[in-house]
Amino acid sequence: MRIDVVSIFPEYLAALDLSLIGKARQDGLLDLNVHDLRDFTTDRHRTVDDTPYGGGAGMVMKAEPWAQALASVAGAGNDDGGKRPVLIVPSPAGAVFTQAMAYELAEEQHLVFACGRYEGIDERVLEWAGERFDVRPVSLGDYVLNGGEVAVLAMVEAIGRLVPGVVGNPESLVEESHSDGLLEYPVYTKPSSWRDRNVPDILLSGNHGKIAQWRRDQQLQRTAARRPDLLEKIDAQQLSKADRAALQALGYEVTADRVLRRP
Ligand code: JCH
């Protein structure tokens, strides 16, 4: 997979040299390049921003440096009928980035990330880019960042680890994909007793059936406590008898196909 990132703070993306993603780059699985937007300016001051039309606080990123940068990374026109590269534009006004989106984007051949700063990028850049890219404004969540770089770090990590060969043990991805929309169960490692806190006995029992049941129960309890919104989205058809009993004990009513908070 080829990934290009354009930013006025290319050093911000240095973390992509590390860990799993850094290894995948070394291994040739990810062809990841970071570009400095200012290299695509033509004035003496390498200007990338200007005042907003209509007034208001802050500055807006100028269109022309972005068009030059994006044209340079877009590659030759896709006159071979091939897919257009995907242009991901982090924005507080984007669709929320999800694991489902990460799976979809992991199938793409070429991703380009445009990191805005200030109050964002002149909207005409996104319109113009629509002629050569599949343009996707994406938010990391409902909170405000100062620019797109942190969002890109998160998305490249989430997408990159789904590219075949990037995660050393693909079993962990399989396990993850079977998590059924519930939060993960808690995990423990040695020592079994630490500062007077013990690992739950069941995990030391060697009874793999009982362990699986306990973990599933922990997932349901955690999800009810921390993310009740996820429980209401669950397809009740996939719930076992034990799951239903656990949810009932947690104050939920389980109908044929839905999980409802008991009033
Ligand atoms: C960004 C900004 C407009 C702040 C500039 C570029 C993404 N999930 C998420 N939160 N924030 C972002 C994000 C992404 C790119 C840029 N800013 C700063 C821009 C604002 O309007 C309210 C606020 C923020």
Image (tube, rainbow, N blue to C red):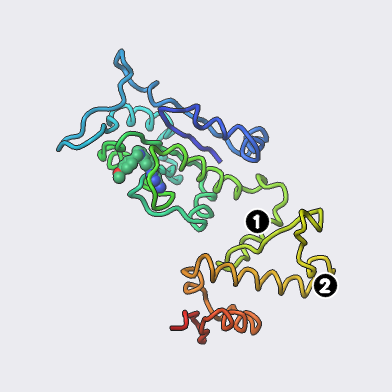
Is residue 227 shown left or right of residue 198?
left
Q: Could you tell me residue 57's position as x and y percent?
A: 22, 36
When asked about the image quadrant of residue 14, the answer is top right
- 195 or 263, nearer to the observer: 195
Is residue 259 shown left or right of residue 74?
right
Vertical relation: 262 (above or below) 45: below
Q: Which element type, helix, strand or loop, lies under badge 2?
A: loop
Q: Residue at x 79, y 70 (%)?
A: 202
Q: Could you tell me residue 47's position as x and y percent?
A: 30, 21
Under mark 2, the amino acid is: Asn
Mark 1 or 2, nearer chain start: 1
Residue at mark 1: 173
| Label placed on residue 195 | none
Under mark 1, the amino acid is: Leu
Residue at mark 2: 207
Q: Could you tell me residue 163's position as x and y percent?
A: 60, 47
Q: Is mark 2 within 8 Å of ligand 1?
A: no
Q: Residue at x 40, y 40 (%)?
A: 79
Is residue 131 shown left or right of residue 172?
left
Q: The N terminus is located in which quarter? A: top right
- 23 or 132, nearer to the observer: 23
- 173 or 117, nearer to the observer: 117
Q: Which residue is drawn at 51% across and 32% down?
A: 13
Tag 1 near tag 2, CB within 8 Å: no
